[in-house]
Image (cartoon, helix red, strand yellow):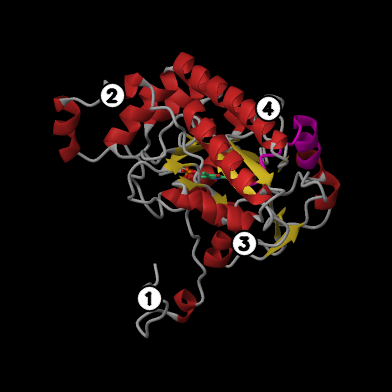
C-alpha cells in the first residue's frame, strides 16, 4: 500500500513517532497457496459450527459476560488449573499488549531475543518500555545464561518465531528460578506443534512470576475468531484484570466465547490436526533439504529455510509469481531465509514441485 498516511498535524507527537507492526499480507487473490501467516490449513472443529443458532443471534442484543466465565472454565479444565489462573483476550496479541502494560513498565529494561516475534518492540514503543535485545547464538538457539542481568521482565517465544526452534523446559525453569523478582512471559503461540518441546504450564504452581500465553489462532484453526489466553499465578492474573478493566470490559464477544468453548472441548479433532501438521512438516523439511535448503529444526507449524540456488528475496518473488505466498523478513541475520507455513499435504507438494522447477531453470 503506497497511499498510507504517515503524518498529520492532528496527531500527537507521540503518535507521529510510532512504528506499527506490519502483519503478513491477507491477499484477496483467488487460488493462491497461502503459506505466509502460519494459519492452519484445516477447518476449525466441526463442533464450532454447531454453536451458531438463532438463540445465540438473539442474545447479541445483550453485552457478553465481562468475565468470560464459560471460556475460563473450559480453559481451566483443559489445563488442570483453576479459573483464577486464567486470563482471556481478543487474540493473544491483545493479551500480550495488556501484559506488557501490566508488568514491564519498570526501572530496569525488558529482555527479549534479537530474533523473535516482531510485535514485542512495537509494544515497547507504544507503552514506552525500555528494552534490550539479547542475541541468539549463531545457530539461533537461545542461551538462558545470557539473560542473567538486571531486568524488569523477560519475554521468550517458545517455540521461537520466526525460527521455529524450541527451548527445553529445564532451561525455562532455570530462567524462572534465576529471575524470581521479574515476570517471565513464555509466548507459546506454537507449542501444540512441538514434539520435543513442552508447555511451561506445569511450572506455574511453583513459579508465581511465570505467565504462559497461548492462542486459538494457530493450532485450533481459529485465527479469524480472535481469542487468546494466558495462564499464571492468581496475582499475575489479577494484575491483568485490573488493566483489562481499565481498557475494555468486553474483549470476548458472545460468538467468540461460544465458539472458543466448543473448540477447546474437542480435543480429539485438535490432536489429529496437530499430528497431521507435524507429519507434513517432517515431509517438507526432508524435501527441502533434498533440494539443498538449509532448514532450521522446527517445533512449530512453519519452517525457516535458507535456499542454496536462488537468494531468499528473489525466491520469495519467484514463488509469488507462481501464486505461492511465503514470508520474507528483510532483517539482519535472517534476510537469507524464507519462513514457510506448513499447509496441507497437497499445498506442500505444490510448493516442492515449483521449487524443483525453479531449481531446474537455474541449473540449466
Ligand atoms: C501469531 C502469534 C501471536 C498472535 O496470535 P493471535 O492470538 O492471533 O493474536 C502471538 N505470538 C506469536 C509468537 C505469534 O506468532
| Magenta stretch holds residue 9 | no
Marked residue nearer the N-terminal end (2 or 3): 2
Residue at which label 1 appears: 5
Say which element carries label 4: loop
Bounds of the magenta segment: 162-175
Instruction: For marks 2 and 3, give the CA distance.
Output: 39 Å
Tag 1–tag 3 contact (CB < 8 Å): no
Instruction: For marks 1 and 2, give the CA distance.
Output: 39 Å
Instruction: For marks 4 and 3, give the CA distance.
Output: 30 Å
Tag 1–tag 2 contact (CB < 8 Å): no
Q: From the viewer's side, name the closer residue of 118 and 37.
A: 37
Q: Is residue 132 left or right of residue 87?
A: right
Marked residue nearer the N-terminal end (4 or 1): 1
The label nearer to you, 2 versus 3, is 3
Q: From the viewer's side, name the closer residue of 201 and 198.
A: 198
Marked residue nearer the N-terminal end (4 or 3): 4
Q: Residue at x 83, y 56 (%)?
A: 149
Residue at which label 4 appears: 198
Residue at which label 3 appears: 330
Marked residue nearer the N-terminal end (1 or 2): 1
Amino acid at each position: 500500500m503506497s497511499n498510507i498516511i504517515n503524518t498529520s498535524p492532528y496527531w500527537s507527537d507521540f503518535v507521529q513517532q510510532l512504528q506499527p507492526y506490519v502483519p503478513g499480507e491477507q491477499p484477496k487473490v483467488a487460488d493462491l497457496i497461502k503459506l505466509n501467516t502460519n494459519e492452519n490449513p484445516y477447518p476449525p472443529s466441526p463442533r464450532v459450527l454447531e454453536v451458531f443458532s438463532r438463540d445465540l443471534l438473539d442474545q447479541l442484543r445483550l453485552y457478553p459476560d465481562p468475565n468470560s466465565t464459560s471460556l475460563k472454565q473450559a480453559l481451566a479444565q483443559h489445563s488442570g488449573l483453576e479459573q483464577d489462573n486464567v486470563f482471556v483476550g481478543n487474540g493473544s496479541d491483545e493479551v500480550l499488549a495488556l501484559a506488557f502494560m501490566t508488568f514491564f513498565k519498570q526501572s530496569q529494561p525488558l529482555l527479549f531475543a534479537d530474533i523473535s516475534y516482531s510485535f514485542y518492540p512495537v509494544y515497547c514503543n507504544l507503552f514506552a518500555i525500555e528494552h534490550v535485545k539479547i542475541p541468539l547464538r549463531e545457530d539461533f538457539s537461545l542461551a538462558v545464561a545470557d539473560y542473567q542481568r538486571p531486568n524488569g521482565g523477560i519475554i521468550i517465544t517458545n517455540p521461537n518465531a520466526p525460527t521455529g526452534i524450541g527451548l527445553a523446559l529445564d532451561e525455562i525453569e532455570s530462567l524462572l528460578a534465576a529471575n524470581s523478582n521479574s515476570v517471565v512471559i513464555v509466548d507459546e503461540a506454537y507449542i501444540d506443534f512441538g514434539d520435543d518441546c513442552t508447555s511451561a504450564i506445569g511450572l506455574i504452581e511453583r513459579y508465581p512470576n511465570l505467565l504462559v500465553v497461548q492462542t486459538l489462532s494457530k493450532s485450533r484453526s481459529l485465527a479469524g475468531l480472535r481469542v487468546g489466553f494466558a495462564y499464571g499465578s492468581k496475582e499475575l492474573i489479577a494484575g491483568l484484570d485490573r488493566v483489562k478493566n481499565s481498557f475494555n470490559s468486553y474483549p470476548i464477544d458472545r460468538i467468540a466465547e461460544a465458539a472458543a468453548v466448543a473448540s477447546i472441548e474437542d480435543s480429539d479433532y485438535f490432536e489429529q490436526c496437530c499430528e497431521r501438521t507435524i507429519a507434513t512438516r517432517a515431509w517438507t523439511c526432508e524435501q527441502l533439504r533434498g533440494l539443498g535448503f538449509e532448514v532450521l529444526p522446527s517445533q512449530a507449524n512453519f519452517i525457516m529455510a535458507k535456499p542454496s540456488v536462488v537468494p531468499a528475496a528473489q525466491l520469495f518473488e519467484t514463488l509469488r509469481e507462481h501464486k505461492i505466498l511465503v514470508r520474507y523478513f528483510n532483517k539482519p541475520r535472517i534476510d537469507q531465509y524464507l519462513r514457510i507455513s506448513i499447509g496441507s499435504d497437497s499445498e506442500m507438494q505444490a510448493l516442492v514441485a515449483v521449487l524443483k522447477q525453479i531449481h531446474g531453470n537455474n541449473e540449466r
